[in-house]
Image (cartoon, helix red, strand yellow):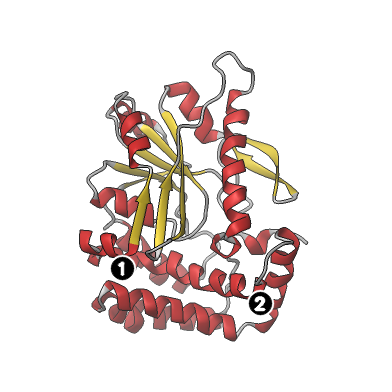
Amino acid sequence: MKVLETPTRDVLRLFMWYPLRWLICSLPVAKAITLLRFMGDMHYYSSRKKCSDLKKKINKLVPRIKDASFAVQTYFRNHYLDQLFILIFPNMKMGDINKFVEIEGLDNLEKCREQQNGVILVHGHFGPAHLPLVVLGLLGYPMNQIGNPTDAGLSWIGKNVAYRLRMRYESMMPAKIIKVNEFLRPIFRALKKNELIMTAGDGSGTDDEFGQHHEYFFLGQIRRMPIGPAILSVKTGSALLPLFVLPGQKKMYRIIIGEQLTAPPGAENREIMITQKFLNKYENFVLRYPGYMHFLDRFSV
């Protein structure tokens, strides 16, 4: 979600990262999640114009949607859960995972790890993006995340309060963060050690592009998408599996790890073909749960 840098936002940051952060960290996981959803609701009900714009975009992108207003409300809730779930993760235990998260496809992951060549999990900015990283880490998998943490464009308070504290909490996750714009040797080392690499397959959410991109028809528009995860898979021989966070059927969330994405060995442009397979799956889930996608406000209508 795009949010402008303003003095008002800085005041809200100070409130968020000091008294409210302490409150969230002190609450049981269930109550902390309820509070973050409530914050999303407050933002939703106080942002009439933004909600109207998002509703128009959702109706354009998902013409058959039954309740665009609920999708917009979900979008606001998901924004706060995605951004602030890092305050909840340090308190999460296996009991919380069993209570809130359904996991499908661990057999696909285990089958690929038997090859002893590491596994690449490609995901979209969809739902609480860090949730699979933490869940799989708590399950004992050696996790690595390729990310782009940056304080570019932030105010002084944004850099020295919000960003600084966010980095502190991200360092508490059971995973290593590998910066996408730095040396990528740690990625190859991790794969050789049969570890897991998580990386986004739908770009950075900004105008910046890292690695090679290709144009795809996605949600009715031409979008430039990264083919780096597929290139990494082809070069290293490591399996590439799609990963998604969806609303749960019986619990709050459902993590799905799909079957390995491949292309014929002798085919040209294998990376482009493999990425297309991921995007086909991703688009299907966006059409079903548009409120879970982080970048809705970046689409034109």
Task: Report the front residue among 180 and 260.
Answer: 260
Q: Is residue 120 above or below residue 148?
A: above
- Which residue in the structure is indicated by mark 2? 51
Q: Earlier in the sequence, mark 2 or mark 1?
A: 2
In the image, what residue occupies the spot 35% across and 56% down? 102
Q: Along the horizontal axis of the image, is 180 left or right of 174?
A: right
What amino acid type should be assigned to the residue bearing mark 1? Ile
Residue 78 percent location from the top left of the image: 49, 68
Secondary structure category for the residue under label 2:
helix
Residue at the far right: name it.
301
Residue 248 percent location from the top left of the image: 42, 61
| Quadrant housing residue 249 | bottom left
| Quadrant housing residue 141 | top left
Q: Which mark is residue 88?
A: 1
Q: Is residue 182 visible?
A: no
Residue 3 percent location from the top left of the image: 58, 70
What amino acid type should be assigned to the residue bearing mark 2? Cys
How many C-alpha atoms fall within 10 Å of the one at disc 1: few (<14), some, or many (≥20)?
many
The answer to the question of whether label 2 and label 1 lie on touching residues, with beta carbons closer than 8 A, is: no
In the image, what residue occupies the spot 35% across and 82% down? 20
Q: Quadrant of the N terminus?
A: bottom right
How many C-alpha atoms fall within 10 Å of the one at disc 2: few (<14), some, or many (≥20)?
many
Secondary structure category for the residue under label 1:
loop
Q: Is residue 131 above or below residue 84?
A: above
In the image, what residue occupies the spot 28% across and 65% down? 99
